[in-house]
Amino acid sequence: MSISRRLEGRSALVTGGASGIGRASARRLAAEGARVAIGDLDEAGAAAVVQEIEAEGGHAIARRVDVSDEAAFRALIDETVEAFGRLDVLHNNAAALGRVAIGGDDEVEHLAVDVWDRTFAINARSVLIGCKHAIPRMLEQGGGSIVNTSSGAAILGGLSGTAYASSKAAVNCLTQYVAAQYGKRGIRCNAILPGLIMTPAVAVGMTSESVEMILDHHMTPEAGRPEDIAAMVAFLASDEARYVTGQLIRVDGGITSHAPTYADIRRAVAAGR
């Protein structure tokens, strides 16, 4: 596939960029011409992504950061501007994936408050911090694009993942507030709501049976890949999306676009019943 250079001369910051969606997004933004800063708790993993980008002719830097720490995240934004001279794109992607990262994210009556607080600190507070300190930098140059990674779980009820889903719902709301408050000043803000994306976190946190159960409800024949989300990130970062802001964009294989009985009816039709 031929990749355009529509982000030539721009710079981007991707959090949670050491693996999964963040890694794919960092590589895609760099492939389209952007200079990319990668922030992650996994400094070695982020450095490995920098090597991949540089091997393909791109330019990137990696830094260790706890995105829930305001001083550390602000320092990363400042360092990105110092290294590249500007900040055009912020991809708030770092997240704690419920049980995988924190544990105990179950039914409300069994949900520990500290699990709720830590999940919100990583998934929601970090997005506020990123926006808060990136926006002034973007305003200095006349605008920019903020892309937040949310989740399809934020718009549906479920039996587990209460804190995770609620924190992502907060990301959705914040996305629209940023878009409303700064759109006239040149800053666009959108959120992507992924469905089942086959990342390393999925491999660790979900059984093959669980994956198949969820995939059964997708309208697509296969689960999503990190590159599917990265393609949307790059589009939203570019001028081709100049008229797109305040949107909660579902990139989910259609799982949130059908009736709950979809999979059962599809099997019944296939069986001739």
Image (spheres, rainbow, N blue to C red):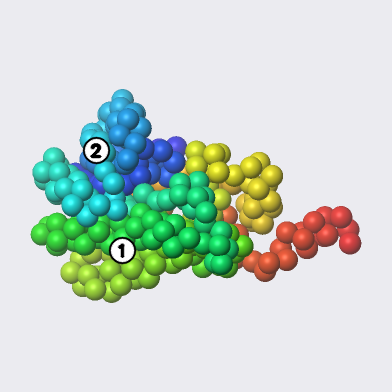
Query: In the image, which disc is placed on residue 51?
Result: none
Q: Quadrant of residue 264?
A: bottom right
- Mark 1, Cα crowd under 10 Å, few <14 / some 14-19 / many 20+, is many
| Vertical relation: 223 (above or below) 31 | below
- On the image, the x and y values in percent for residue 97 come to 47, 50
- Residue with the mark numbered 2: 63
Q: 43 or 1, which is in the foreground?
A: 43
- On the image, the x and y values in percent for residue 70 come to 22, 55
Q: 12 or 129, which is in the foreground?
A: 129
Q: Residue furthest top?
A: 55
* Residue 272 located left or right of residue 13: right
- Residue with the mark numbered 1: 189
Q: Quadrant of residue 126?
A: bottom left
Query: Which element is circle 2 on?
Result: strand
| Vertical relation: 136 (above or below) 198 | below
Q: Amino acid at mark 1?
A: Cys
Task: Name the residue at 20% across, 66% down.
Answer: 186
Query: Which element is circle 1 on?
Result: strand
Answer whether residue 225 is visible to the viewer in this image: no
Task: Name the residue at 39% across, 61% down.
Answer: 117
- Mark 2, Cα crowd under 10 Å, few <14 / some 14-19 / many 20+, is some
Among numbered discs 2 and 1, the one appearing first in the sequence? 2
The quarter of the rendered structure image containing the N terminus is: top left
Q: Quadrant of residue 62?
A: top left
* Residue 260 located left or right of residue 116: right
Marks 2/1: CA–CA distance: 24 Å
* Residue 153 located left or right of residue 140: right
Mark 2 against mark 1, which lies toward the viewer? 2
Q: Amino acid at mark 2?
A: Arg
The quarter of the rendered structure image containing the C terminus is: bottom right
